[in-house]
Image (cartoon, helix red, strand yellow):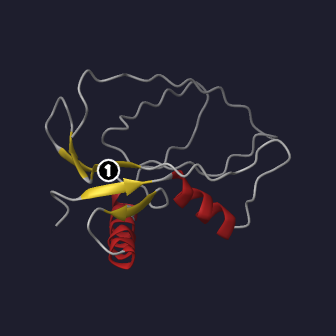
């Protein structure tokens, strides 16, 4: 169903979501419209394994090329509901000394609330740049 579709991604989708949730920013951080978008195939292939993966975000994917806004929104909602089922989730319970690695080319990820006032956590992010675009 998704093969051959091109998704439209925009930070404005996330900004609309945050505004709807009551997050308008803080004194230090102001959410402003960027008015830029990118287009990527909705189905990508992992460069090493060739396995297919969906490439979308529930809030940043704002359309599908050639589709009406309503139809695209329905598909994104359907994909979000399907891919976020508990049976597909891994929720890590942090413990001292943990090292967690994830491959963003294959994982839809989301952070959950973490009380930084009560617990400290040191995070390192490492990025690997592929030599060719993942399509």
Q: Quadrant of residue 80?
A: bottom left
Residue 105 placed where, x, y %? 32, 38
Number of dots carrying numbers: 1
Residue on which disc 1 sits = 55
Residue at x 23%, y 26% (from the top left corner): 132
Instruction: Check the image and name the residue furthest to the right.
Output: 27
Helix, strand or loop for disc 1: loop
Residue 18 higher or lower than 128, as above or below: below
Residue 44 higher or lower than 119, as above or below: below
Q: Nearer the viewer, residue 40 or 43?
A: 40
Q: Nearer the viewer, residue 114 or 61?
A: 61
Asked whether, in this view, residue 21 is left or right of residue 40, the answer is right
- Neighbour class for label 1 at 10 Å: few (<14), some, many (≥20)? many
Residue at x 51%, y 50% (from the top left corner): 110
Q: Quadrant of residue 88?
A: bottom left
Residue 59 placed where, x, y %? 49, 60
Residue 29 higher or lower than 17, as above or below: above
Residue 49 placed where, x, y %? 15, 34
Q: Nearer the viewer, residue 110 or 69?
A: 69
Residue at x 47%, y 22% (from the top left corner): 126
In which quadrant of the rendered image does the N terminus lie? bottom left
Residue at x 36%, y 44% (from the top left corner): 107
């Amino acid at each position: 169903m998704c093969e051959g579709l091109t998704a439209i991604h925009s930070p404005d989708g996330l900004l609309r979501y945050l505004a709807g949730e009551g997050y308008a920013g803080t004194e230090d951080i102001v959410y402003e419209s960027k008015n830029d978008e990118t287009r990527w195939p909705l189905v990508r292939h992992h460069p090493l394994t060739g396995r297919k993966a969906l490439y979308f975000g529930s809030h940043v994917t704002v359309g599908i090329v050639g589709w009406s806004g309503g139809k695209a929104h329905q598909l994104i909602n359907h994909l979000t509901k399907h891919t976020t089922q508990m049976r597909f989730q891994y929720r890590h319970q942090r413990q001292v000394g943990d090292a967690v690695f994830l491959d963003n080319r294959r994982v839809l990820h989301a952070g959950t609330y973490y009380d930084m006032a009560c617990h400290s956590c040191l995070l390192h992010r490492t990025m690997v740049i592929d030599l060719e675009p993942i399509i």
